[in-house]
Amino acid sequence: MSHSISSIEEFVQKVKAARQGNLDLSADEDLSIAVMNLISLEEHFFFSGEKTGDPSYYDLLREVREIRKVMLKKLLPTYNGEDWCISKHLLASSMRLMEVGTKQLGAGQKENSREMFSHAFKLYGLFWAVASGTLKGRVEIQQSLHDTPLPEGKTIADRFSALVKKALDCCRE
């Protein structure tokens, strides 16, 4: 199966058609943020269990993990262990960088916060590249996307960030 994409417009169409017309990008974007928060809850229950010595937090962690698995499956309906694990870590890292950026913004460190937000969005773009099948088993873009040179100082993640900005619309109801 070829995953070659020759233009940004083709990528946008691929994302929109990723699940045979059943993809609601606004709902899936909301769901991806919910998965981020579920991962964060898993982490919180772990640390609360360790800090307090109360094992009931681990029971809650297990319940939240099961919900997270069901929700992530809605975003990645075709199970592939590598894509699943990579996707989970991309979402978790994106969420953590958003958290750090928000804290830095609140502390008046605007430049540092923008850097964190930029990295968070790049990771989020890579998540959608994996979820849409644009990346397959390797963190590289298909040759047709390589044919367009990257601007100086830009990365593959920058390219996917730009594509995600064009493909996703979080304000659509």
Image (tube, rainbow, N blue to C red):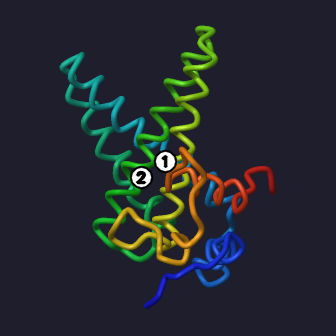
**In the image, what residue occupies the spot 49% across and 38% down?**
95
Q: Quadrant of residue 113?
A: top right
Q: Amino acid at mark 1?
A: Leu
Quarter of the image that includes the C terminus: bottom right
Does label 1 or label 2 sit earlier along the sequence?
2
Are discs 1 and 2 less than 8 Å apart at CB?
A: no
* Near-viewer residue (74 or 14): 14
Which element carries disc 1, helix, strand or loop? helix
Q: Amino acid at mark 2?
A: Arg
Q: Position of residue 9 (x, y in %)?
A: 72, 73
Judged left or right of residue 103, residue 23 is right
**In the image, what residue occupies the spot 24% across and 36% down?**
58
Give the label on residue 123, or none: 1
Label 2 crowd bin: few (<14), some (14–19), many (20+), radius 10 Å: many
Judged left or right of residue 90, residue 33 is right
Q: Residue at label 2?
A: 68
* Near-viewer residue (168 or 165): 165
Judged left or right of residue 97, residue 105 is right
Is 16 situated above or below 140? below
Is 158 situated above or below 111? below
Which element carries disc 2, helix, strand or loop? helix
Q: CA distance from mark 1 to mark 2?
A: 19 Å
Q: Position of residue 14 (x, y in %)?
A: 62, 77
Is 145 situated above or below 62? below
In front: label 1 or label 2: 1
